[in-house]
Amino acid sequence: MALGSGWRSAALALLLLLLGVLQAGAQEGILAAFSNGTASTIKEFCIVYNSQWMPFPKSLRNATLYQLQDLTNTTLCNSTDVPPEGIKDNLVVVMRGNCTFIRKAQIAQMNLAKALVVASVDSIFPPSGNQSDYEELKIPVAIISHIDVLSMEKMLGKQISAALYSPPVPPLDYSILIIFIIAVVTVALGSYWSGIEDPSSGNSATSDYRAPTSGGDKSEALSATLTPVTVVVFVIVCSVMIVLLYFFYKWLVFVIISIFSLAAAISLYNCLAALVKRIPYCKCKFPFHNRRIEIRLVLLGVLCVAVSAVWVVFRNEDRWVWILHDCLGIAFCLNFMKTLKMPHFKSCVILLILLLIYDVFFVFITPFITRNHESIMVEVAAGSGSGSGEKNTGNNLMELAVQPLAHNEKLPVVIRVPRLVPSVATLCGIPFSLLGFGDIIVPGLLVAYCRRFDVRTNASSIYFILCTIAYAVGMVLTFVVLILTKMAQPALLYLVPCTLITSAVTAWSRKEMKMFWAGSGYEMINPVGTSEEAVEAH
């Protein structure tokens, strides 16, 4: 299971999918249903809504009770769908499809309904639509599973009163702290690993800066290096891929799951093998094709494949599989930072700035381009695609922060930590805070370069330490803006300036900017001594 060019291609393909939108918050709510308008029999059901539309009361005590009118035999796309008796002062339940959510809400509002709930037989997501349209809405709009509507009538009968509310979500949650720790520790550990000696190969981190001595070594070095040209191509492919995901999410998500399961198994193996090889016991080998292979490494490979297979089978079991998923994700990030080498600071600058532009464009600019004025990045991160409730087919959008509520497939390219929202989580599933792998790996490549530069110049880890601290500061800034705005944030918007500026200032203050910028284009005359002279290698 040695890491080869096939693994690198799969890993690059996976990273380009989603650089990550840090998300926290919730758009879930509760429909409290009463039999005959009394509190003697009450049932609660999960609903989802768009927080930018009409706000919901924060508690059942503050919510208004309405008579529920079941019109699930119609989609309410035309005024003729309104029954002769009207829908005035009622909470109306209609079926999803044939027209937009905005259109349904406008008809309900024109006919003096007090609230609209759309029943969906597919996965439920918060509704979406043009801002100019939903700003005119004066009634709450929510989505509910059609199965829950049938269950509600079976348990409570036909005469039902109902109220809509959404319990508040605390702005600070333990999940944010856990994500912070995971991100910073992963970046620090992966970068440090990138700079230490590998006893299994006999090569040190300093060899990354020396000119190749053979054609084979040169080929291997190039296959693990992002040059400025490959950086530009990489970002272009990123852009194409996320657009494809936006339009063809239902099919491409399974391709991503397949790639991740393979990449995760290989990454976990390489991370654990680095530890196992340091154990001086149980080194029994057996011959295989003119080679001798350690039995313990074969067993380790089988174990890693089995772990990845367990994740594939139980990937939608949110209550516990997120732990396994995060472990595989951390291994993937660590192995990626260890394997992919940035040859110089110039490549780091080009990569981080281009991906920052990419991230900001697909989060903040695409709402001005898409038909429904929604962010492509957030839709893909949330597990949906185009369609957005504008047609009868396709998933609806989720703008903010929670994971999809039904068993639709999710992109496995994020660190996921469940939030502590027990009142809603019991009904709606577990909401998660998310951080994309790209928000760990992309700045991590710069931190790893700083670590290798420290090793090369015998700089006592000054670049590595300061850049890691800068990454942590960038994460804190991301959390602060996330909490203040209550909107999904492109973390690279804060991580890139913090890490790039810190690295550049450090190199400038130490009068090493030229060497730091050129990277492997320079060779130390005496890398282990005190001399700081450098000459150009090529």
Image: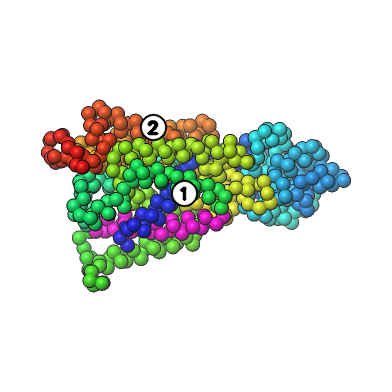
Name the residue that disc number 2 marks: 497
* 21, 23: nearer the viewer: 21
SS class, disc 1: loop
Q: Position of residue 95 (x, y in %)?
A: 73, 50
Question: For residue 107, which quarter of the picture?
Answer: top right
Q: Position of residue 246 (x, y in %)?
A: 55, 48
Reply yes or no: does residue 276 show up in magenta. yes
The quadrant of the picture occupied by the N terminus is: bottom left
Q: Amino acid at mark 2?
A: Pro
Name the residue that disc number 1 marks: 17
Please report the residue visible at 45 percent of the width from the left and 45 percent of the height from the top: 236
How far is disc 2 from disc 1 in space, using C-alphas? 22 Å
Reply yes or no: does residue 494 show up in magenta. no
Please report the residue visible at 52 percent of the width from the left and 52 percent of the height from the top: 410
Looking at the image, residue 258 sits to the left or right of residue 524; the answer is: right
State the predominant SS element of the stretch in magenta.
helix
The quadrant of the picture occupied by the C terminus is: top left
Q: Is residue 332 above or below residue 370?
A: below
Q: Amino acid at mark 1?
A: Leu
- Residue 153 circle label: none
* 320, 98: nearer the viewer: 98
Question: For residue 494, which quarter of the picture?
Answer: top left
Q: Which residues are magenta?
A: 250-277
* 189, 32: nearer the viewer: 189
Q: Residue furthest top?
A: 509
SS class, disc 2: helix
Q: Is residue 411 above or below residue 299?
A: above
How many C-alpha atoms fall within 10 Å of the one at disc 1: few (<14), some, or many (≥20)?
many
